[in-house]
Amino acid sequence: MLARLPGGGPATLPPRLTAAYLERCRAGVHALRPGLPVVALAPSVHRAADYGLAHPHRAATDAAVRRWAAGAPAVTVLDVPALVGEHVLGGHDNPDGLHWGWAGHSAVGEALAGLLEPTVARP
């Protein structure tokens, strides 16, 4: 597996391209719905043996996402590692070590709802 190479192998998507693609998505959404809130999820953590238990590119991708969000209109970053880190690294995720369990999904969903709730118009 490439992830087991020294340095973790190549990134699936280099951080600079991650930010560029996020901006293209945001611009497209805002072309149709200006000002609509956009939430970017900071890259999660894992304990997947298939990825060598390593996160070689996560920090750089996280920094790129946060830099992009800071300069983009109406974008908030949801700190996913803060929400699921203990859950995942404590072995409460799925057996593959990559996907969150129910509690992880619940934590992210509740936090996302909390970010978006103030933006929802009530009748």
Image (cartoon, rainbow, N blue to C red):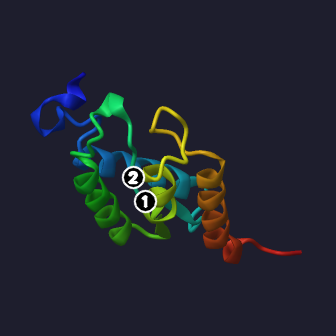
Q: Residue at 45% across / 38% down in the picture?
A: 97
Outermost residue toward the top? 1
The amino acid at mark 2 is: Pro
Tag 1 and tag 2, C-beta contact below 8 Å: yes
Q: Nearer the viewer, residue 27 or 122?
A: 122
Give the mark toward the camera: 1 or 2: 1
Please tell me in which quadrant of the rendered image residue 12 appears: top left
Lower sequence index among marks 1 and 2: 2
Q: Amino acid at mark 1?
A: Pro
Which residue is denoted by mark 1 in the rendering? 81
Can you name the residue that lies furthest to the front here? 90
Up the image or down, 32 lies above or below 118; here it is above
Q: Position of residue 2 (x, y in %)?
A: 21, 25
Q: Position of residue 123 (x, y in %)?
A: 89, 75
Mark 2: few, some, or many residues within 10 Å (few <14, many ≥20)? Answer: some
Where residue 105 sits in the image (x, y, percent)?
A: 62, 51
Horizontally, residue 34 falls left or right of residue 123, namely left
Q: Quadrant of the N terminus?
A: top left
Residue 112: x and y in percent read: 61, 64
Is residue 118 toward the left or the right of residue 51 in the image? right
Q: Is residue 46 above or below residue 64?
A: above
Task: Tell me which residue sits at (38%, 65%) in the image.
Answer: 69
Residue on which the image places disc 2: 43
Between 47 and 70, the residue placed more toward the observer is 47
Name the residue: 14% across, 29% down: 5
Q: Disc 1 on helix, strand or loop?
A: helix
Q: CA distance from mark 1 to mark 2?
A: 7 Å
Q: Depth check: 37 or 43 in front? A: 43
Left or right: residue 106 versus residue 98 is: right
**Residue in the image at 41% along x and 58% along y:** 42
